[in-house]
Image (spheres, rainbow, N blue to C red):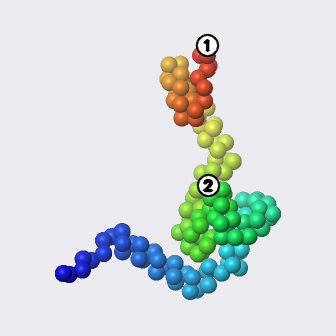
Amino acid sequence: MSKQPPDFHERSQQSHERAFKRLQKAGSTSAANVRRRLAVIADERLIPTADVLKALRSDRATLDFCVEHAISTDWVFYGDLKGLLRTVRDARSTTPEATLAQSQEVATLFGQLTPHDRNRLLNGLRNMTGAAPKRGPAA
């Protein structure tokens, strides 16, 4: 019986594992490098040093910190630059400036809707957020 060639997913997984082994062999996974990467992102995002120090207590604490602050664990633990790119792209869409710009755009577009469409939109937003419907005159 001949062995089947690995499928795309399996080959991709093997490639991913080899890449992480190369990064590990190069020293990217050292505690000092993890500490540097956390310090860089914390400095950029104005995250208190005390929070970073707590994150460095264990791998689990670092993982929780990364999840809380939307930081790629591939970048923090291994130095994977694709993870850094994902972290930067995600951060761009969640900055206070981006949020303000989105709010202003929503307000502008909302003002262009008919009263009927405004009510439909508000009801949809209430459904998405779980907010209770307003009673009485339309908002």
Q: Is residue 121 above or below residue 18?
A: above
Q: What residue sits right under mark 2 in the picture?
A: 92
Q: Residue at x 70, y 70 (%)?
A: 58
Q: Quadrant of the N terminus?
A: bottom left
Q: What residue sits right under mark 1 in the picture?
A: 137
Residue 104: quadrant of the picture: top right
Q: Residue at x 51, y 82 (%)?
A: 21
The spot of residue 93 in percent (x, y) is: 60, 51
User: Who is closer to the viewer here, 4 or 72?
Assistant: 4
Q: Amino acid at mark 1?
A: Pro
Tell me if I can see residue 37 in this picture. no
Q: Secondary structure at mark 2?
A: helix
Q: Residue furthest bottom?
A: 25
Q: Residue at x 69, y 78 (%)?
A: 31
Q: Amino acid at mark 2?
A: Arg
Q: Is residue 102 above or below residue 10?
A: above
Total number of numbered discs in the rendering: 2
Q: Is residue 52 above or below residue 104?
A: below
The spot of residue 16 in percent (x, y) is: 45, 74
Q: Residue at x 66, y 57 (%)?
A: 69
Q: Residue furthest front?
A: 1
Q: Secondary structure at mark 1?
A: loop
Classed neighbour count for the residue bearing mark 2: other residues with Cα under 10 Å, few (<14), some (14–19), many (≥20): few
